[in-house]
Every structure is written in C-alpha cells, then in structure tokens.
Image: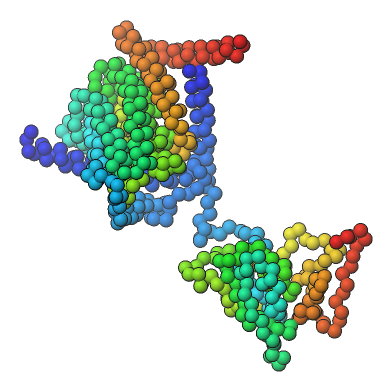
Amino acid sequence: MDRVIDDLIALGKGLSITFKNYLEKPVTKQYPEEKRDIPKRARGRHVLHRYNDGLERCVGCLLCQGTCPAGAIYIEAEENDKENPVSKGERHAKVFDVDLLRCIYCGHCEMACPTNAITLENNTALAGFTRESLLMHKEDLLEPEGSSTLGTTEYWDPKPPEDLSHRVPAQTGEFDGSSTSAAAVGRGDLDLNKAPKKPTRKEGDNA
Amino acid sequence: MEPILALELIVRAVIVSALLQLAFAMMTRWERRAMAQMQWRIGPNRAGPAGIFQPFADGLKLLFKEQLMPDGARPFLYLVAPCISLVVALTSFSVIPTQLGNWPFPVEGRSLFQIADIDVGVLFLLGITSLSVYGIVLGGWASGNKYSLIGSIRASAQMVSYELALGTALLSPLLMVGSLSFREIAQFQSGGAWLVLSQPLAAIIFMISALAETNRAPFDLPEAEQELGAGFHTEYSGMRFSLFFMAEYIAMITVSSVLVTVFFGGPILLPFMSADAFLFSESFFWYAFKILICMFCFIWIRATFPRFRYDQLMNIGWRVLLPLGLMNLAITAVGVVFQMPWWGYTIAICGAVALLYVGGKLSRRQESNH
Ligand code: SF4
Ligand code: SF4
C-alpha cells in the first residue's frame, strides 16, 4: 500500500509538469504567415549565377553532373558563338536540368563547380503537384537578367583563415583546383593572359 | 401518462440529447486545443476563430465519408453496435439532476435537463452504463477482425473489473446519505460538508475507475492505437465511427456528472452553503462549471500519462482499488452505525490509509534488513 501512495505522488508530479506546460506559450510557428529564420547557408533550391556583364557563369564543364551522387543533374553543353557568347568559357550549358525529386541537397555540385556558377540557395519551400513541376530547367534556375549574385558562397561562418593555402575562389577571385584552373575553364573575371597566382603554402602544411 | 406530459418529456429528451451532442462537439475541439497547449503546440486554429468550427468540419467530413463494411462482418450486429453505445450513453444522462430548484430553467418543480427523477437513480445509472460494454464488445466481435476482437475482449474484462471498484466507491457515500436518488444525494450536501470531504478515498477510487469505465487514457486499452490499430472501432468508418466517439465523450460527461453530484455537491456553489441561501447559491451554471473542471481533468490526465500495461490494469483494479474500496465501505458502515459527524469519517479513513502506508514502509524495511 505504501508503494501505491508513493506512485500517486509521482503521478501528481507528472500532472504538475503538464499543467506548467499548459500555461506556457506554444513554440509553434504558423508557417505560411510566420516564417522561421533559416541559416544563410541552408541548402535549398539551386540557382545558376551570372557575371556582372550578364554572361552566365556556367561553362558547361559537367563537373557538377559528374559529382552528383544522386544523378540529379543533366547537362547538354554547346560551343559558344564567338560573336555572341552565352558564357565566358568555350562552351555553355544549352540544357541544364536539375531533378529536385532526385536531389538530396548535399551541395556537392556547388563545391565541384570551378566558376561558382551553381549554388544551393535558401529557397526551401519546394512543393509541387506534378513530377514535371519539380524538374527544374535552366530558365527556372538561372537568376534573372541584370542580377549578378554569388549566393551562399558569400557567407562563411566561421570565416576561413586569411592565410589559407586553398583560397575561397568566390572571394579571392582566384581558383585553386589542383589539376585545373578557373582560367582554364573560362573563369570570366580573371585575365586569361596572366598566369594564375601560385597558392602559397605554409611550412609544415602537408596538405 | 397524459399525452401532454409525454410530449413534454419527449421534447425535453430531444433538447438534452441535442445539447449533449453539441457538448461533445465542443469537447473534441477543446480537447485538441488543450492537449496541444500542454505539448507547446497550438492545435486546430484554421476553421473559424480559434478553431471553433473544427468539430463541424469534422462532422461534415465524417458524414460524407464512405461507410465501409468488411466482408467478414456480421451485418446486423455490426450496424447495431455503435447505436447501442450511443443510446446507452445518452440514456444514462437522463437521471442526473443538473439543478435542484427552478433556477434558471423552471419546469414546474423539476429541472429541465433531468428527464426522469427516479428513486433508484444510482442503480439505474450503474445498470445502464454497464450495458455500454455491449456496444464495444459486439462492435469488435461483429467486425470480423482479430484486432477488434482483442480490443473488445480487453474492454469487457476491464469494464467488469472496474465496475466493482466503481460500485464500492459509490456505496460508501450512499450509505451515509441513505438514498439512491441523485436529487436526495445532492440535497444531503446542501448546507453541510460535501461528500468529498467526508469520503476522500471513495472520491479518488471513483475518479480512477471512472477513467477506466469510460475507456479514457491511460485506461484506453480497448482502442490501443499502437498494438491493436484502434481496437474495437478499427473497421468502422465515417458516421458509424463517430457514434462510438460520441458515446465515449458523452459517457465522460455522464461520469463527471455523477462525480459532481455525489461528491462535489451537485449544483451547489460552495461547500457548507445551503441550496436556498440566495438565488445563485444553486444553479445549473455551477453544475456546468464543475463538469467543465472534470472534463479538463480528463484531458489533462490523457495528455500526461502513458497507457497502462494489461497486467498493471488488472493489478490496479483488483489488488488496489477493490480492497481499498471495501475497507472504506467497512469504515463507513461502522461510522453510520455510530452516527459519526462528517469529519469522523475523514479522520477514520485518512488514519486507516496512513496506517497502511506506515505499515507497508515498516514491513518493507524489515524485509530489506533480513
Ligand atoms: S545538391 Fe547534391 S544531389 Fe543535389 S544536384 Fe547537387 S550534387 Fe546532386
Ligand atoms: S560545374 Fe559549374 S560550370 Fe560546370 S557545368 Fe556545373 S554549373 Fe556549369
């Protein structure tokens, strides 16, 4: 019988906890009206960026397609018309499809891209009534003409150290791929005639 | 009976059942809101301001849903079972006095919502509520589904076990009052101590077994979603399901009415206040207010405790509540013989419980010393 009374007291404690909760404010956000702040680098829908002069950053190198673990990207590259180029490289992407239903939002494509052409942006409200509506084409992904942003690559938290041997290309205007270079794939804001700067290595850095 | 009287009774019965169903609708919304609040959520808030039209939206949805009947079902019983549940729940409310005098709904010396003021109201109510297990058992059995069947078997065992505890808990106050009429029980408490003060143990036992009788969490084993897939009403859809649902909530209202009438002074405002002290000292509104508090407790308990295991359920019923109830009954019987004042019962019962507690602790210590 003593146990029963002890148990009843314990039950009372449980009741007091729920009653305390009852008096507190709900944590629910009323979603469509009220939005939660999401981290700046949250990985949502892809955006294809442009340079300041309106040319597309993507040079159709297929690196993102190759690295994509989900096989979500499909690209058809085309030679640029010399007079009237679409991108700054030799080629540009004629077709650039991303299947949002396949994509796992891992961000590998933005890491692979040598020209920072593709980034995953904060648009996380991805829903559609048909499969087709979630198959993004180049027109859907490309940022509008006249706008030229770097997207999430602008935000670093924590900031990368100043003396990093592998620099952040979007910020330095310098690309450090070990086997390729931004200039080689047509990084537009670099002078093609000037050789890319050698990355500086610190002592004891055995990267 | 004169035809005009019969007509009046029928009209009143229709009003009461309509009001009960409205109360049920509002209860579902309130329960969802209150439970959400206890879990730091908001709950339904889209249909109307603060979601007050939610129950009507739900009702419409259920009305227009397809009414499925499984191939293995026994059609007649399958269809009749939810009706049994609902009819039983509605009928048992008819003997509850919601007010003692004429205020505020005068019908010539009777209260509007008490359709039948019968002398054996408590017996009638116990008899009728124990019929409600038929709705559940037949519904589960006639569905032709083994999980439903398990659910209804659980329900029958549970209801039979807890009916005993419920009965013994009610017997002690009845002994003190010396009447089976709800109206006399309520009048007994007018101007004196409420029976919860003289019979605290009986009140607690009654509350716990009332939870079990209405199949409410944490005693909702017959409809355990996790292991039985909603138990006895798995195969019911649309309005047939909502009849079961309605029966459960109306049974909750009835059971809280009994609790309020027998232990908490019925429609009287405060303990030790006489029913005719002043105009508002006794009214339907106080009664409704007390019911609301009981309903909140039902919701509160549901939001707090997980479901019992089946062996725990049987242990509580047979090895805790029933012996305690019998002890309480014995003490009360002695008290009635010696014509104790109301505080005599309180002291005797609390003393007995304290003795049991100390004795249990001592014997446990002795065991651990050996
Ligand atoms: S985020 Fe990952 S899965 Fe999605 S397209 Fe880029 S590489 Fe493929
Ligand atoms: S990796 Fe970048 S530049 Fe290459 S195809 Fe993909 S988006 Fe275009």
Q: Is residue B37 above or below residue B285?
A: below
Q: Position of residue B173 (x, y in %)?
A: 32, 19
Occupied quadrant, residue A161: bottom right
The residue under the point 50% across, 56% down is A30
Question: Compared to A204, does B302 lie above or below?
Answer: above
How far across and how far down the image is residue B291, in percent? 34, 35
Residue A171 position (above or below residue B196): below
Q: Is residue B23 left or right of residue B298?
A: left
Residue drawn where x is 37% and y is 52% of the image: B54
Picture coordinates of residue A168, whole percent (x, y): 78, 67
- Any part of residue B283 in sight: no
Q: Is residue A206 visible?
A: yes
In the drawing, does residue B283 fall left or right of residue B309? left
Most distant residue in the front direction? B72
Q: Residue at point 49% right, 33% down?
A: A15
Q: Quadrant of residue B153?
A: top left
Quarter of the image where the C terminus of chain B is located: top right
Whether B202 is drawn above or below A96: the answer is above
Quarter assignment of residue B65 = bottom left
Query: Depth check: B52 or B207 in front?
Result: B207
Q: Is residue A46 left or right of residue A114?
A: left
